[in-house]
Each structure stands twice: as structure tokens, then as C-alpha cells.
Image (cartoon, grey):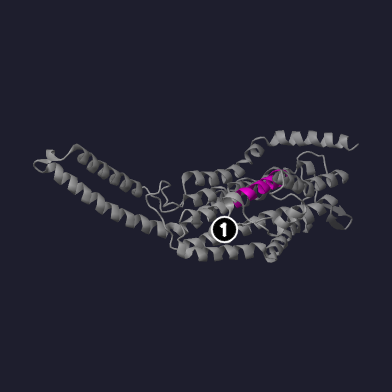
């Protein structure tokens, strides 16, 4: 795929910026003809993800008779965590990638096109772009993500092979020993590692993005305290941070809400226990902070720019006010022409308005809309648990009916 096009083209011959372009997974997408340049690329990737995860597990569970019995751990149909992870979270992850890639590309472009990064620092910025390109194309981060994906997947199995394990559809007893069912085999050796790899890859991209912002914040930026965005002209960085909200929603559903909901409804854990409510509270608070705290790296420059601008405009407003008051208070002030008076008053009004505007300038480049997007996604993913808590009995009845229909469909 070509690097950057249209509105994302690198300005002035600089190295193009992207967090995802030509990395390992994007190259796989290109081979499978489901890349961004293909029509309906995102829906195709989402469907492919579902076909590699939930569909094989469901078919193997049906083949192995791992259904029925209502809201119990041995009933695959009752494992709504699998639905949330593979049927909801995977499409959301696929959707978030082009949105995040586009918004972060825009930031890199506007830093130059808006003159925020000064000409003397553009070679440094291009070098940072080149370093990001090398890191995203390296095979080692992908191999690390794959390794950790299997570690996290297999770690879930450890309790199921310990003493007095809870029966689940993942494993089955054969006389003196236990083994994975066919559905469990695909779940923990294919489906779950694939899901883990997807979100671990995003974590790596987020770390690259934070590294990029840190490098930019070290440069002497050309900030404008009178800019209408109230953040010196870099409000577009806050807009980009807000676009990570879809990733937060997907991660919260797959890694927080789904497992916690499974513990509450299937394993009957108490919501008041620390292992249950702890991840919910930690995620709801920590996820927005992950994308707002890096913006504090720009605070020093914004604060100093605001301080200098206030001092400059305070002097000019005071000087102009003194001149106007002196002329209006002196004898014969009516000798001044009306146009001159209007001009003086208009200039004083403009200076006063600009001074008040600078006073409102934020020293952290984020706005309530972006913060609201991040917080809304984190709380929204946690809120998906509410129907499970409210309609526990009804859900049990629903899964009982689904089990009977599934049995009739399978000839049982």
C-alpha cells in the first residue's frame, strides 16, 4: 500500500507518519485483499475475524454437545463473554484502526502545515517519523505481541487444570485426566490468542503515539495564545486523542465487562468483592487518564506562552487605556474627530477582548468534548454489565430456550 495520500500526504517532502502503515498485520491484510484500499475493507476484516474465532468454536461446541442446561459454565451458548469478545469487540477493534490512523496522521500533518513545528525543527520531526516507521515495520513487536497473546490465553487455563476446578465447556474429564475439548482447543490456541494479539498490537501503537507526542513536546513549538481553540493552536491533538474512544470501548467490552460479567452471572461472584469491582473502577478511571496524561507534556510550553502573552497584552492594554483616558479627560477633547475616537475605542476594545481570550487559554491541550468521548467509552463499556445484573433470571430462561432450539437443530 502506498504511504499516505490525499489529505494525509507528508508536507514538504517529509517522511510520512503512520502508526499502522505496512506493519505485519497490514501486510497480511494486503495478501488477503482486505486492506483499507479495498471496498468494504473494515466489514470484510471484521467478518474474517469472526470466522476465525467465534464461528469455529460454536461449530465445535455444537459437534461436541457442549450446549444446553441453562445458565451454567458447561453451556457454550450461555458464555456471553464469547459473544462480547468475538462478535462485538473484534468489529470495534477493526473499526477503530482506520479512524485512529487517520486522526494521528492528521496531527503529524497539521503540526507542519499550521506552522506549529518551526522550520528549524522539521528535520528533527522527519527523523522521528522515520524512527516510528522503522519501529512499526519491525517484526519484533509483532512477535512479542504473539508471544504474550498465548501467555495470556494459556494463563486462563491454569485454574481449570488445578485441583477441584469448576466444570466448563473448555475442558472435559476422561477417567483420571482432563483435556481440552475441541471447542476449548480452538478457543485457547486460536481464537483467544488472535483477539489478544489484536489488542496487544493496539497497545504497542499507543506506546508509539505517546513516544511521538513526547518527542514533539521537546521541540520549541510556535504556539499562538490568541488562537480560537484556546490551546495555542494545538487543539487538534486533543481531537486525535478523542478518537481513541472506540478502542477503549472495544477493550473495555472484551477485557473488562465480558470476564467480569461471566464471573457475576455464571460463576455467581459477588459484585462487592474486590476482584470483581476493582477492574471495573480501575478501567473506568485509568482508560481516560491513559490518553489525557500524555497531553501534560505540552503544559510547560503552553503555560509559558500564556504567561508571556498576558504580560505583553497587559502592557499594551494598559498603555492604550491610559492614552484614551488622557485624551478624553483633557480640555478640548471634543476637538478630536469622530473617526479618530471610534478608531481609538475600537482598538482598545480589540485589545481588551484578546486579553480576556488569552486569560481563558488552557495550559493542557484537551477539551471537554474529547474527554467526554474517552470517559463515555470507558463508562459505556462497563455499563454493558447492567442488563446482566438486572435480568439475571430472565437471561437464564433465555439460554434455556436457546439450548432446546439448538438441540432440535442438531437432531438431539
Residue 161 vs residue 322, the one in the foreground: 322
Question: Residue at 75% of width from left, 48% of height from top?
Answer: 49
Residue at the spot 60% in from the left edge and 63% down from the top edge:
132
For disc 1, the marked residue is 209
- At 55% from the left edge and 66% from the top edge, which residue is drawn? 127
Residue 185 in the image: state x and y as whole percent.
82, 54
Residue 241 in the magenta stretch? The answer is no
| Marker count (numbered) | 1
Helix, strand or loop for disc 1: helix
Q: Position of residue 143 (x, y in %)?
A: 71, 64
Q: Residue furthest right?
A: 411
Query: For the stretch drawn in magenta, what is the main secondary structure?
Result: helix
Does residue 154 show up?
yes
Say left or right for 203 vs 169: left
Give the image location of residue 33, x and y in percent. 76, 50
Quadrant in the rendering for residue 176: bottom right
Residue at the spot 74% in from the left edge and 54% down from the top edge: 30
Q: Residues within 10 Å of mark 1 (few under 14, many from 20)?
A: some
- On screen, residue 379 above or below 110: above
**Residue 277 in sight from this viewpoint:** no
Asked if residue 234 is positioned above or below residue 339 in the image, the reply reads: below
In the drawing, does residue 77 fall left or right of residue 242? right
In screen coordinates, is 376 left or right of 331?
A: right
In the image, 151 versus 166, the foreground residue is: 151
**In the figure, is residue 148 to the left or right of 76?**
left
Boundaries of the magenta span: 85-101
Q: Position of residue 4 (x, y in %)?
A: 62, 54
Q: Quadrant of the C terminus?
A: top right
Amino acid at each position: 500500500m502506498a504511504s499516505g495520500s490525499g489529505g494525509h500526504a507528508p508536507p514538504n517532502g517529509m517522511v510520512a507518519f503512520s502508526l499502522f502503515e505496512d506493519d505485519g498485520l497490514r501486510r497480511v491484510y494486503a495478501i488477503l485483499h482486505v486492506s483499507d484500499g479495498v471496498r468494504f475493507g473494515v466489514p470484510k476484516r471484521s467478518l474474517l475475524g469472526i470466522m476465525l474465532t467465534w464461528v469455529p468454536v460454536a461449530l465445535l461446541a455444537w459437534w461436541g454437545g457442549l450446549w444446553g442446561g441453562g445458565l451454567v459454565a458447561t453451556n457454550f451458548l450461555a458464555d456471553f463473554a464469547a459473544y462480547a469478545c468475538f462478535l462485538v469487540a473484534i468489529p470495534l477493534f477493526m473499526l477503530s484502526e482506520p479512524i485512529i490512523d487517520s486522526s494521528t496522521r492528521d496531527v503529524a500533518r497539521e503540526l507542519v502545515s499550521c506552522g506549529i513545528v518551526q522550520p528549524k525543527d522539521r528535520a528533527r520531526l522527519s527523523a522521528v517519523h522515520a524512527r516510528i516507521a522503522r519501529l512499526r515495520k519491525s517484526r519484533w513487536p509483532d512477535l512479542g505481541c504473539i508471544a504474550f497473546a498465548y501467555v495470556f490465553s494459556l494463563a486462563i487455563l491454569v485454574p481449570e487444570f488445578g485441583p477441584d476446578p469448576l466444570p466448563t465447556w473448555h475442558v472435559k474429564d476422561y477417567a483420571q485426566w482432563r483435556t481440552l475439548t475441541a471447542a476449548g482447543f480452538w478457543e485457547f490456541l486460536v481464537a483467544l490468542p488472535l483477539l489478544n494479539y489484536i489488542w496487544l498490537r493496539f497497545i504497542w501503537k499507543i506506546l508509539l503515539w505517546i513516544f511521538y507526542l513526547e518527542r514533539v513536546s521537546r521541540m520549541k513549538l510556535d504556539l499562538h495564545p490568541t488562537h480560537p481553540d484556546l490551546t495555542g493552536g494545538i487543539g487538534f491533538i486533543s481531537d486525535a486523542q478523542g478518537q481513541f474512544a472506540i478502542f477503549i470501548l472495544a477493550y473495555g467490552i472484551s477485557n473488562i465487562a465480558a470476564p467480569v460479567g461471566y464471573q457475576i452471572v455464571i460463576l455467581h461472584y459477588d459484585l462487592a468483592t474486590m476482584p470483581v469491582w476493582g477492574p471495573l473502577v480501575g478501567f473506568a478511571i485509568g482508560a481516560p487518564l491513559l490518553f489525557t496524561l500524555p497531553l501534560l507534556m505540552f503544559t510547560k510550553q503552553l503555560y509559558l506562552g500564556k504567561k508571556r502573552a498576558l504580560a505583553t497584552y497587559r502592557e499594551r492594554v494598559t498603555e492604550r487605556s491610559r492614552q484614551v483616558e488622557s485624551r478624553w479627560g483633557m480640555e478640548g477633547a471634543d476637538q478630536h474627530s469622530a473617526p479618530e475616537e471610534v478608531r481609538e475605542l475600537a482598538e482598545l476594545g480589540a485589545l481588551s477582548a484578546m486579553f480576556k481570550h488569552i486569560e481563558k487559554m488552557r495550559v493542557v491541550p484537551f477539551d471537554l468534548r474529547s474527554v467526554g468521548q474517552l470517559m463515555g467509552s470507558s463508562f459505556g463499556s462497563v455499563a454493558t454489565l447492567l442488563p446482566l445484573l438486572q435480568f439475571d433470571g430472565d437471561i437464564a430462561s433465555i439460554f434455556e430456550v436457546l439450548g432446546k432450539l439448538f438441540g432440535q437443530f442438531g437432531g438431539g
